[in-house]
Amino acid sequence: MSDTTPAQATTPAQVLEVRDVGKTFTVPGKGGRRQLRALDGINLDLRRGETLGLVGESGCGKSTLARTLMMLERPDSGSVRWDGTDPYQLKGNDLLALRRKVQMVFQDPYASLNNRMTAAEIISEPWRTHKDIYPRKRDRAARVRELLHLVGLRPSDEHRSPQEFSGGQRQRLGIARALALNPEVIICDEPVSALDLSVQAQVLNLLNDLQAELDISYIFISHDLSVVRHVADRVAVMYLGRIVETGSTEAVFDHPAHPYTEALMSAAPTLDPATRRERILLSGEVPSPLNPPSGCRFRTRCAHATDICATTVPPTVSDQAEPGHIVECFHPRGRVSLGMPAVA
């Protein structure tokens, strides 16, 4: 018999671990060059076969984090581990092999596809770099048709160019391209925001079906809370370069602990009268990342801020009733107490 407990046996393997990641850009200005801290101490985990929703206002750093995880940006501090491997220590074929495991679906299906290429050329383009996958043309042609069928397009569509597809069909084509290298993780950066509502539902259902069939993990970036609630297993809430709350979708949506999350959830539309909350209106604008507030970055818009919020970065504390639900705040709401520090 194995000594592994049932709980351990059913725990999904961790495919991504992000610890204290920071990213700063140098920005020119009237007074000379200034430092923009886009990411500041980011901590995230992603498990195999799950969807992690990443939400927050425009400009909070979601896309910068996605680019960093895709190894398109190099962090200034902290660590990123894909399956325990630091991608920034790899070179040559080792790095190429890791890149194959992580792919991306972009926000705008009208800008992310080359109109001068056919659907078959778009899907098969990654194989020009990763030459060991389907090295024979006959195998590539067959795989293109399989992928088109997998995402709900017709195999005969392989000769059509992107402008001959609708928006939803173009996004399906983008998903087929992301699947071409058989990835373990797909980062979806606002993948349905440019689509009509009915088409959004079709694409979201497709992503769910593909996850169930292929055991893919998603990082799903969106500002649409209803979409995130539909697709995500866990949610991370981002504000001005920091993750302020993380937990299961149910815990974050139904028992928000950070005042910012609470305000976001109060604005989410719902048809269930039992779950409606009084709308919380935030005062002021999001501060500039060129000059973020000291201490807690949310304090300038928070109705619960006190003196300590201006001088000290808030601690990370846990929800006693929900393991894995953590919040970075001196004055957490609801079930979370300052007496329960988060377990590292």
Image (cartoon, rainbow, N blue to C red):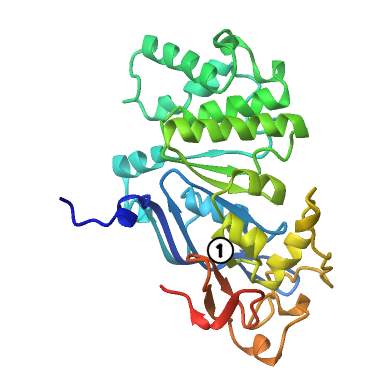
In x, y percent, where is residue 214? 43, 32
Q: Residue furthest bottom?
A: 307
Dividing the picture into quarters, in which one does residue 332 lie?
bottom right
Judging depth in this view, the residue of 43 and 247 nearest the camera is: 247
Q: Residue furthest left?
A: 1
In x, y percent, where is residue 90? 32, 50
298 sits left or right of 95 in the view: right
In x, y percent, where is residue 122? 54, 23
The residue at which mark 1 appears reads as: 246
Q: Is residue 73 above or below residue 209?
A: below
Q: Residue furthest front?
A: 274
Q: Please state, as top left, top right, bottom left or bottom right, where the C terminus lies in the image.
A: bottom left
90 sits left or right of 111 in the view: left
Judging depth in this view, the residue of 317 and 140 nearest the camera is: 317
Judging depth in this view, the residue of 59 and 271 nearest the camera is: 271
Question: For numbered disc 1, what is the local secondary structure?
Answer: strand
Q: Is residue 92 above or below residue 118?
A: below
Q: In this rendering, does residue 224 appear at all?
A: no
Dot 1 amino acid type: Thr
Within-10-Å neighbours for mark 1: few <14, some 14–19, many 20+: many
229 sits left or right of 281 in the view: left
Residue at 30%, 51% (x, y): give it. 9
Q: In this rendering, does residue 274 appear at all?
A: yes
Residue at 59%, 17% (x, y): give it. 153
Number of numbered discs present?
Answer: 1
Judging depth in this view, the residue of 202 and 63 nearest the camera is: 202
Dividing the picture into quarters, in which one does residue 208 lie?
top right
Q: Is residue 284 above or below residue 118?
A: below
